[in-house]
Image: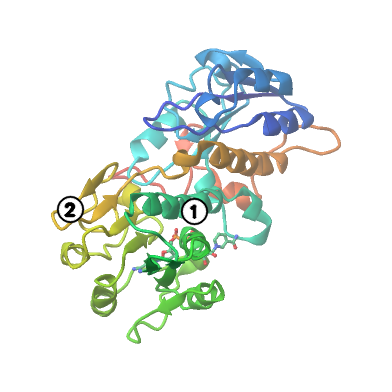
Amino acid sequence: MKIAIVRERADGETRVAATPETVTKLIGLGASVSIERGAGESARFPDAEYEKAGATLGGADVVSDADIVLTVRRPTAYAIKGAKPGALILGAMDPFGNEGEIDALAKAGVTAVAMEFMPRITRAQVMDILSSQANLAGYQAVLEAATSFDRAMPMMMTAAGTVRPAKVFVMGAGVAGLQAIATAKRLGAVVSATDVRAAAGEQVESLGAKFIMTDALKDASGAGGYARELTADEKAAQSALTASHIAKQDIVITTALIPGRPAPKLVTADMVASMQPGSVIVDLAAERGGNVEVTQPGTVFTTANGVTVLGYTNWPARLATSASQLFARNLYAFLETMFDKKTKEFAVNWDDELVKATVLTKGGAIVHPNIKLPGAA
Ligand code: NAD
């Protein structure tokens, strides 16, 4: 049983899908582990540490004869050439809008497993890459906002007078948003937040922040704990409420997402124009088009009225070590369920609900019900 870990090829990707810690555990499952040289370098895991953990180092050909390939981002069919037919490729597959690439993996004969499709049930929490990475992104968003902000975050009473605390508004109080709220509170900011799921209100308030929600919108909870898309009327009511609030904020952090859809636009150009010079916006949804009308995905810029907009598209990659540690543990936790503890044999239970939910390709075809090639019936 061979497990291979490849070096990430995507621009700006600093994470790695296995750490020396998880390599030791994978070997404990009875597998041999090969890792591409330099795979962990930008996450501060040197090759020597992997070797010490028992892995074999190699070139891009580490995938040769692999039964399992671990990646952070979806690899190209070319990058996994040489893996065994039917090999499991585990990582974030980002399939929506990329159906052609998923089809290429199917045609390459491998079984692509989309870790981001992990069901949100108690048993699978330890395998949930969306939560582990969003948590860190929410934290990092506040730190980078604070650094771009020319003023202090907490209230400071000094001999020279009092500095007022920063006002931070978090839009979307899911995993990233709640961590952003907690981090901003710790830095001493006055924090408010909004969400379209009523359940988020209690969580926001338990962190000591103020919850803001329009009466026109009772609850827009959708399936699996996620939000549904708002109707046009609901959107208008939400926008009217947030417009006046945003004008008074120093820092706005947006994290709102709806599974499989472009990020909802919550902050218009007019709202940005209403903010004071020196204000900061962090758009954590930039990778999915952004929650802020003016966001330029992948860049940081300052608007004509002096608002800095941070639109980085890969926030977890900005804390590569922590993000890799958690991501690698998520992958390990899922893989562990596929090994027989006694015989140490690798045997995937294709009927397991976690496997069914995450497997995109098998036997040369796309098998996931939600992934269709454009034009396919
Ligand atoms: P997400 O990344 O899909 O979205 C982020 C947040 O944006 C969500 O809270 C969503 O309600 C909100 N949002 C969507 N549209 C919005 C809009 N128009 N305006 C304002 N906010 C909007 O969600 P997530 O952070 O991954 O998690 C959502 C929920 O799932 C949370 O309650 C979380 O605690 C829960 N969860 C459960 C498990 C589990 O049980 N295993 C694991 C992870 C998360």
Outermost residue on the left side: it is 304
Q: Is residue 361 visible?
A: no
User: Of the numbered discs in the image, which one, if any, rests on residue 303?
Assistant: 2
In the image, residue 143 above or below residue 89: below
- Cα–Cα span, label 1 and label 2: 24 Å
Quarter of the N terminus within the rendering: top right
Q: Residue at x 48, y 77 (%)?
A: 201
In the current view of this chain or complex, which residue is farthest to the front?
A: 159
Find numbered disc 1 in the image and state the secondary structure of the residue it sits on: helix
Residue type marked 1: Tyr
Query: Whole-percent x and y of residue 100?
Result: 34, 36
Name the residue at 47% across, 32% down.
14
Relative depth, front residue between 185 and 77: 185
Q: Is residue 246 left or right of residue 335?
A: left
Compare marks 1 and 2 and give the one earlier in the sequence.
1
Q: Residues within 10 Å of mark 2 (few under 14, many from 20)?
A: some
Whether residue 13 sits left or right of residue 85 in the image: it is left
- Residue in front for this viewpoint, 213 or 78: 213
* Residue found at x 68% / y 18%: 51
Residue that carries the numbered disc 1 in the rendered image = 139
For the residue pair 107 and 121, the one nearer the viewer reads as 121
Taking 129 as reference, is 42 above or below it?
above
Residue 93 image point, x, y percent? 45, 40
Q: Secondary structure at mark 2?
A: loop
Q: Nearer the viewer, residue 25 or 74?
A: 25
**Residue 32 seen in render:** yes
Q: Left or right: 60 with respect to 152?
A: right
Which quadrant would residue 56 be assigned to in this image? top right
Badge 1: residue crowd in 10 Å (few <14, some 14–19, many ≥20): many
Identify the amino acid type marked 2: Thr
- The x, y position of residue 118, in whole percent, is 56, 51
Q: Which mark is residue 43?
A: none
